[in-house]
Image (spheres, rainbow, N blue to C red):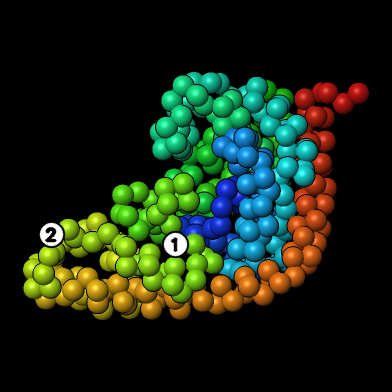
């Protein structure tokens, strides 16, 4: 039997290049080799947008379009909506008893997001416990692998802790250890060079960006502020166009030559931005075209989500049944 992959995204906005290199590329490559479930985590998105559920609802379809645009094939991957699989929430409730508040507070991914969003003492309980919800999503499908960005690896560790705790308490082996599959890049820097690419920080290049939007964003990329004249020596470290060339330019030898040229002076930032613009446009253009085609038939997209959610619910229901039998709460 094929091994199982569970992965997904929160529909808080369209997907960007950080998602693409961090996880989406892996999903497309692996969908023919694995039994892949792709989750649109709208319920988790509501931990941020509980006051504006309409924002999340609209973005469910946008994320689905992005999935199809990058090449996720609904004939090979099961795309489904989290909130429409109630078995996941029942599993979350049972798993919450297996995790302490202190352990959640130590989760590095959660701590980073709380700091980024400046929540401090106003953390919603749903947001605080979303690592448990994420574990329920993964374990419901008994996943072997989860393609994630580097910053999400602590979530996988916590999932395995919950599974082991469950086995220890209820003297049964339902689950197995899950492995994180880290993308080739890990984190992709945003165009401002200050942090990873993020929808909330406004420093992202989206998969559906038009050529004009892409050009504006590339031109706004952070470079060496001390590189005032073309002839000035420049610093490569922290230089966003070079960061993107490292990721997207297939000619690594030429990229290294450009770095040496920049360091000794005589190479302008405009030349580098022009190069990365051409490379990114070549990467994004086919996705943009596929996205536009799917957007013309949203009825078909909704049917993909409906049938995928039905299939996912059947699998989650079986896992929930196994869990309740192990716990002795079948009446």
Residue 236 to residue 136: above or below: below
Which residue does the image show at 82% across and 23% down from the upper left?
328
C-alpha distance separating marks 2 and 1: 25 Å
The secondary structure type at the circle numbered 1 is loop
Which residue does the image show at 82% across and 29% down from the upper left?
325
Q: Specify the quadrant that holds the N terminus.
A: bottom right
Q: Left or right: where does residue 173 sit relative to residue 124?
A: right
Q: Residues within 10 Å of mark 1 (few under 14, many from 20)?
A: many
Residue 14 visible at all:
yes
Residue 267 to residue 326: above or below: below
Q: Pointer 2: what residue?
A: 226
Which residue does the image show at 77% across and 60% down from the upper left?
302
Residue 241's quadrant in the figure?
Answer: bottom left
**Image x and y of residue 53, in percent:** 66, 41
Which residue does the image show at 48% across and 34% down from the upper left?
110
**Camera-side residue: 127 or 138?**
127
Q: Specify the quadrant that holds the C terminus.
A: top right
Q: Pointer 1: what residue?
A: 205
The secondary structure type at the circle numbered 2 is loop
**Image x and y of residue 290, in percent:** 62, 74
Numbered circle sitting on residue 290:
none
């Amino acid at each position: 039997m094929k091994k199982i992959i569970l992965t997904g995204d929160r529909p808080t906005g369209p997907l960007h290049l950080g998602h693409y290199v961090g996880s989406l590329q892996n999903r497309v490559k692996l969908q023919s080799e694995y039994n892949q479930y792709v989750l649109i985590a709208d319920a988790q998105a509501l931990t941020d947008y509980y006051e504006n559920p309409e924002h999340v609802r609209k973005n469910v379809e946008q994320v689905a379009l992005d999935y199809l645009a990058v090449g996720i094939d609904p004939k090979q991957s099961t795309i489904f909506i989290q909130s429409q699989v109630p078995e996941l929430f029942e599993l979350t409730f049972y798993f919450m008893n297996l995790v302490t508040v202190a352990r959640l507070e130590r989760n590095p991914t959660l701590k980073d997001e709380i700091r980024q969003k400046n929540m401090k003492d106003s953390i919603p309980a749903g947001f605080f416990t979303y690592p448990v919800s994420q574990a329920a999503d993964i374990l419901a499908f008994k996943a072997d692998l989860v393609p994630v960005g580097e910053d999400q690896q602590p979530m996988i560790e916590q999932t395995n802790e919950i599974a082991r705790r469950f086995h220890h308490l209820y003297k049964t082996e339902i689950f197995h250890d899950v492995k994180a599959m880290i993308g080739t890049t890990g984190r992709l820097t945003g165009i401002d060079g200050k942090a990873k690419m993020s929808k909330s920080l406004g420093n992202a290049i989206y998969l559906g960006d038009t050529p004009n939007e892409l050009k504006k964003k590339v031109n706004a990329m952070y470079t060496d502020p001390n590189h005032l004249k073309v002839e000035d020596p420049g610093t490569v470290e922290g230089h966003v166009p070079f960061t993107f060339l490292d990721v997207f330019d297939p000619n690594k030898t030429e990229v290294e030559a450009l770095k040496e040229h920049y360091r000794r002076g005589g190479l302008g930032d405009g030349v580098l931005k022009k190069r990365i613009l051409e490379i990114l446009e070549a990467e994004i253009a086919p996705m943009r075209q596929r996205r536009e085609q799917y957007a013309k038939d949203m009825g078909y997209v909704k049917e993909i989500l409906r049938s995928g959610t039905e299939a996912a619910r059947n699998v989650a229901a079986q896992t929930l049944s196994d869990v309740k039998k192990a716990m002795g709460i079948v009446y």
